[in-house]
Image: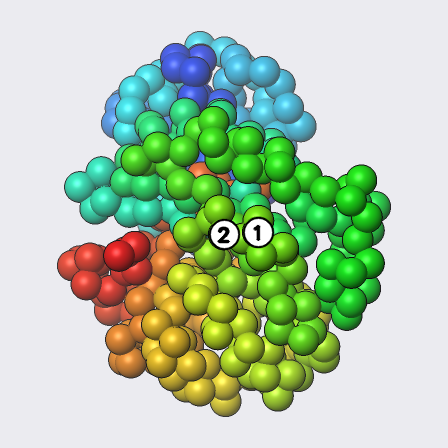
Amino acid sequence: MNISKSIVVVNSIISDFTEIFVQRLVFRLNRLHKPGFTIIIEDETKLSQKCLEILNTLNSPFMIVSDIKQTPFYSVIPNVLPLFNQSPYKYMLINRERKIEPDIFQLKMDRSLNLEDNHIHTQMAFCNGNMDAEKGIAIGRVSGIGKMRFTEHSSQMYIPFHNFTSRDYYVHGLSITDKADYRIDNYLNLKRTHESDFIEFGLELDFDFSGKPIIYEQDLKHFDYILGAMHMIPEITPEAFLKQLEMVVTHNIDVLAHPFRIFKRNGKELPVKLFKPVAKILKESNTAAEINFHTNEPPEDFFRECLDMGVKLSFGSDSHNLGELGDFFYHLDFLKSLGVTGDYDKILWRKK
Ligand SMILES: [Zn+2]
Ligand SMILES: [Zn+2]
């Protein structure tokens, strides 16, 4: 989709969640790169003519017509079309180049699929957008998912904000931290306040270069969902990656976060030759592989290996914003491209 020639039409704040679902729509549209014009309306085809007229007169970039609070992304032309008036927040993409053959989507997941969001941040993440545990829980409840798991970065619970991208902690571990910077108790408080059958609090666990978790043992024991992450490794080479992974999986992690993302992040080529060995390590250590689209493109061929070997897959929104939480539109699409169109229970990781 050519975003510069797209229009999203939203009328008014109908529910408390409208703005969040608009944010979700914006995220989705930014990820879809289909050519041609697109208009989004609900199921009122007679109004599409009106949209086309508006579109024709517009020369502006991506636009949302709305009377909700103005943001840089939104323009306000109220009372154009009714939309987002009720769950599951259906919308329609109309591709003008294909004439009008609308695809209808919904912004909410189908509850019967019982999808779980196993990677969600909180207001405590230094890299946070507008995420907030309490609001996130409210969004999670209306997003059609079966479970949500918060997973804050373990290293960020001990290091100061101004230093959180420093490599030093990965070299030296917690020995160079200062107690005054510790925030793990605040996170444990969030956990105590909010956990329920629907909500778990785990960690996105970082590991230093010697393979030790960046967290104190007495703090780690409070968590029984662990998402293992490799945000920094000694060198961005296939050999160093494999070596670090072998250490990471010995720590009883449930899921490996965004496998291979570190290569692209550092401008390196994807180590295709590692797909098979990594899948094998995950299988042998009973670790699931995360499908994660947050600033990430999961490598299809790696996930094919995982499916072949019976490695369980885990959905993570990696939400740093409320609009991302529990949105598995791309995840389901990705599974479809791998040939999985149903029976998700067979391939998705579930907590024992
Ligand atoms: Zn991560
Ligand atoms: Zn994360």
Question: Which image quarter is the C terminus in?
Answer: bottom left
**Residue indicated by mark 2:** 221
Is disc 1 placed on a helix, strand or loop? helix
271 sits left or right of 156 in the view: left
**Residue indicated by mark 1:** 218
Where residue 219 appears, as percent x and y from the top left, is 57, 49
The residue depicted at 39 percent of the width and 15 percent of the height is 15
Q: Are marks 1 and 2 in contact (CB under 8 Å)?
A: yes
Dot 1 crowding, Cα within 10 Å, few <14, some 14–19, many 20+ = few
Q: Is residue 45 visible?
A: no
338 sits left or right of 52 in the view: left
Which quarter of the figure has residue 93?
A: top left
Type of amino acid under label 1: Gln
Could you give the CA–CA distance between mark 1 and mark 2, rounded to whole angstroms? 6 Å
Where residue 2 appears, as percent x and y from the top left, is 53, 48
Is disc 2 placed on a helix, strand or loop? loop
Where residue 276 appears, as percent x and y from the top left, is 41, 86
